[in-house]
Image (spheres, rainbow, N blue to C red):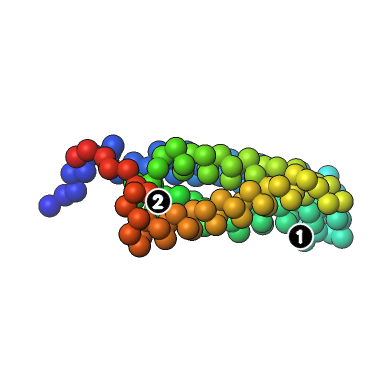
Amino acid sequence: MADTASPEKTMLPITLTIAAACALINLWLASRVVRLRAAKRVEVGDGGDPVMTRRMRAHANFTEYAPFVLILLGLIEMAKGSQTWLWAASFVFVFGRIAHAFGMDRSAPSVLRAGGILATWLVLLALAGYGLAIAYGAPALTTTLPG
């Protein structure tokens, strides 16, 4: 028998929105590397250019964290976690990742870089804790939807 679940019950609007935002951030980070590669005529690697290295790391760092955040976000949303809390965590993550990328452009330590990674770690830790709390019996952390 075919699944007749309505789209309202299966759609994950928060996860879809943040996944789309992450896709755009990923493209933006990649384009920054590509533009610098073209300007510096570096086809592979960093060509010994410290700016290229930092931009490559900003892109790689994003791809290292975004999947875990998106997976946890989607699973918590499916488990009916608090939408307000998930939106807030999502915005902190997105803005933290953008701040981190701009902070990586600086050769010296940067508040943007440190703040961006701190925001990322806190969101990842909070999502992991929230997910575990839902999985192991904290029903007050989920909302009950009719139907």
The residue that disc 2 covers is 76
Where residue 121 appears, as percent x and y from the top left, is: 61, 55
Mark 1 or mark 2, which is nearer to you? Answer: 2
Where residue 53 appears, as percent x and y from the top left, is: 79, 57
Circles 1, 2 touching at the beta carbon (< 8 Å): no
Q: Is residue 11 left or right of residue 64?
A: left
Where residue 104 appears, as percent x and y from the top left, is: 77, 49
- Crowd band around label 2 with a 10 angstrom C-alpha radius: few (<14), some (14–19), many (20+): many
Most foreground residue, 16 or 31? 16
Most foreground residue, 7 or 45? 7
The residue that disc 1 covers is 44
Q: Which mark is residue 114?
A: none
- Crowd band around label 1 with a 10 angstrom C-alpha radius: few (<14), some (14–19), many (20+): few
Where residue 97 appears, as percent x and y from the top left, is: 65, 46
Q: At 35% across and 62% down in the image, what residue appears?
A: 136
Q: At 71% across and 47% down in the image, what residue appears?
A: 115
Which kind of residue does numbered mark 2 sit on? Ile
Q: Is residue 55 above or below residue 47?
A: above
Q: Secondary structure at mark 2?
A: helix
